[in-house]
Image (spheres, helix red, strand yellow):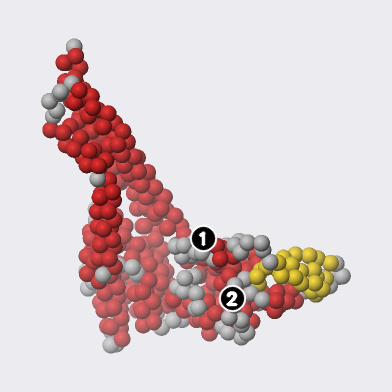
Amino acid sequence: MTNDTKLKKYRYTALKKNGTRVKGTYEAINKKQLLEYLYENDLSPIYIDEITPLFDLQSLKEINIGGFPLKEKVFLVKQFSVMISAGIPISKIISVLAAQTDYYPLKKILNEVYADVSSGKSLSESFSKFPELFDEITLSLIEAGESSGTLDKIFKKLSKDYTQRQKITSAIKGAMMYPAVVTFVILAVLSFITFVIMPKLKTVFKDFNLKLPLITKLLLIISDTFIKYIYLYFLFFAIIGFLFYKWSKSKGGQKTLDKIKMQLPIFGKLYREYQVSIFARVMYLMLSAGVPILKSLQLAQKAVPNFWFKLEIQDVYDHVASGGKASELLLKSSIFPKIVGYMFDVGERSGQLDVVLHKLAQYYETEVMSVVKNISSLIQPLIILLLGVVVGTIVVAIYLPLTQLATSIG
């Protein structure tokens, strides 16, 4: 494959088998890849020309901020699942998906994967060059599917897994929308009062030489300092934010934050159950694909974000590696719920650990979705209380001197 992986746009004219002439455009790494695409679609090229744009916008298309959107991954694995179940060859699937997607970063990767697969490389090896698209878990599943000849079943499971991930992610984002909007409104109101209302009221209070209550004086001082030294506040919060970010990425910071997350009111239970759902889901996917339990535990440990869950899974891994059973440690765990240990024990005794873990994953995913759906009603009283305190304080601070002013004028 050529070192220049930048996609080029070609204009072509070709003949169908019945002699009909067709024209079109196609993006490919080079002319050879375009020819492979045409031949696979039973088209005989009679004219090919590279389209040279007046302005090179290709580099702008290649910018991919924030990683691959989950919806693009869902699209990819769903389409793979459908087409591979229909018996379509891998190279043809990749070629069709590359032409079908409008998301340029994915199109670029699929064209490179197509070139690698066409040269004889395996699908898992070709995708492994792009960790930003598929994680190690997905790649291990694809590799297991290739080895066992069950790639169609693997992509069917991946399709369900990615769809479930998308449902949970969308539900969590939806639940966070209400608090985010309320917080934005509070900040907007405070900014308006600080920068617009208070400076005007200060002039009025000064003109009438009013003796201001302590709460009003404090509000005026805050308003003055924000207006005069706003750049210092921005600098201060930027420094604090940077230091907090660096600390959160350190081992000590991660341990502390992950411990706090598990102990938060309302959110702590949701957070812990989400960790368990990830662990159970990954273990089910790996074991059902024929991946050994030790390798499955390694991948589950990488998938679970929380430090303390990772530590517990490492202990389970060491215990299993020394000849023990996973359930023996999970039943004693202070992190994992007891039901996880019991389910592991049932699965180990029956020889159907993957089936049991599938049920466990479904149970915790249902629990997570249930809590997420009700989270707005759970935190709504806290938000209303916060909003009431903020607005009430401001109203009192403004109302008291205005009452005094009305009395003096009357």
Q: Residue 390 or 215: which is nearer the viewer?
A: 215
- Residue 15 location in percent, x, y? 83, 71
Furthest residue in direction right, as rendered: 19
The residue lying at 38 percent from left, 67 percent from top is 278
Compared to 125, does 55 lie above or below? above
In this view, the residue in front, 294 or 357, is 294
C-alpha gap between disc 1 and disc 2: 25 Å
Q: At 24% from the left edge and 45% from the top edge, which residue is drawn?
A: 229
Q: Which residue is mark 2?
A: 5
In the rendered image, the vertical position of residue 193 relative to residue 47, given as above or below: above
Q: Residue furthest top?
A: 410
Where is residue 68? Give x, y as percent.
49, 65
* Residue 347 picture location, percent across and down: 37, 75
Q: Which residue is mark 1?
A: 71
Which quarter of the figure has residue 274?
Answer: bottom left
Q: Position of residue 61 (x, y in %)?
A: 56, 63
The quadrant the N terminus occupies is bottom right
* Quarter holding residue 400: top left
Q: Is residue 185 visible?
A: yes
Q: Is residue 343 left or right of residue 45?
A: left
State the residue at coordinates (27%, 66%): 246
- Residue situated in front as seen by the camera: 20 or 230: 230
Going by the image, does 55 lie left or right of 267? right
Q: Earlier in the sequence, mark 1 or mark 2?
A: 2
Q: Is residue 356 visible?
A: no
Residue furthest bottom in the image = 322
